[in-house]
Image (cartoon, grey):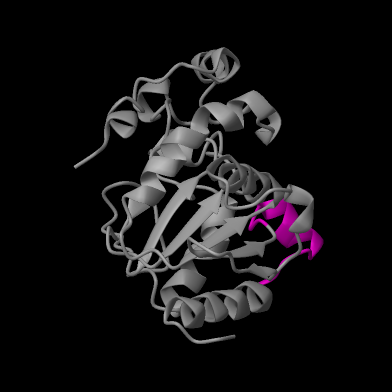
Amino acid sequence: MLGAALVGLRGCRRCGRLAGYIDSLPPRRGCSRQDYWNGPVPGFGDDQARVCLIGLAPGAHGANRTGRPFTGDGAGDFMYPLLHRTGFASQGEVAGLDDGLKLHDLYISNAVKCVPPENRPLPGEFANCRPFLEEELASLPRLQVVLLLGQGAYTSYLRLLRDRGVIQRLGDYPFSHSAVHRFAVGPIVVASYHTSRYNVQTGRINREMFLELLLRVRDLAAGENC
């Protein structure tokens, strides 16, 4: 059952800049606005997941169109075949909400629920969305590992930990690909470069790097000390 915060997500227009951007965003060629989700995109996945993967925000013509994180854009096209290969996803090709995809031991969400202009959320927009993310995390009773894609999502999650009193200084936990942080309470945190098309094309991240990281995350979730 959804908590009060997530029940209110679908109609949220708390961030005026993001709401206005969604209202004015032209659809891609061959589509109409009626083909688009055009609103805050909730997370999805296995409610008994031990792993939660958190990205930055919906893509303009990806999740903002399909209504599901990392679905319909280059980042998802890169990621889902590897999630399938490591047993986290039932299939490697995804298209939309009715494509039959099931996640195993994995929940996927974004730090910001609405598509931002130029893919750059503002600090206040991260803050406005943090309660939604916190409630999603709280709904996963077996959560062991949080995998954060990109520095934006990583920093937003550290701010959540600081607000909870788990950490004192964000600077004590610098971002780097494959960094693993353990805390006195709560899940293990793993950082990764984002799987964006730009990062893939420039070679910042590749399939081998991300596959290796997913295997490590799977082992961490199983309690292996790696």
Does the segment drawn in magenta span residue 3? no
Residue 114 spot, x, y in % from top left? 51, 30
Q: At 73% across and 52% down in the image, what residue appears? A: 198
109 up-or-down from 21: above or below: below
Above/below status of 64 relative to 190? above
User: Looking at this rendering, what residue extends furthest in the left direction?
Assistant: 1
Asked which quadrant contains residue 33, the reply is top left
In the image shown, does 214 or 206 lie closer to the viewer? 214
Residue at position x 57%, y 52% in the image: 166
Q: Percent position (x, y) of residue 72?
A: 47, 47
Residue 71 seen: no
Determine the residue positioned at 66% across, 56% down. 194
Image-based side of 66 in relation to 215, left or right = left
Boundaries of the magenta span: 194-206
In the rendered image of this protein, does residue 16 appear above or below residue 161?
above
Q: Is residue 59 visible?
A: yes
Assign the N terminus to one quadrant of the image: top left
Q: Quadrant of the C terminus?
A: bottom right
How many discs mark residues in the rendered view?
0
Percent of width and height locating residue 75: 58, 54
Q: Is residue 142 left or right of residue 153?
A: left
In the rendered image, which quarter is residue 178 located in? bottom right
Q: Is residue 189 above or below residue 108?
A: below
| Residue 126 place in picture, x, y as percent | 59, 32
Along the line of sight, the residue nearer the viewer: 65 or 204: 204
In the image, 91 versus 177, the foreground residue is 177
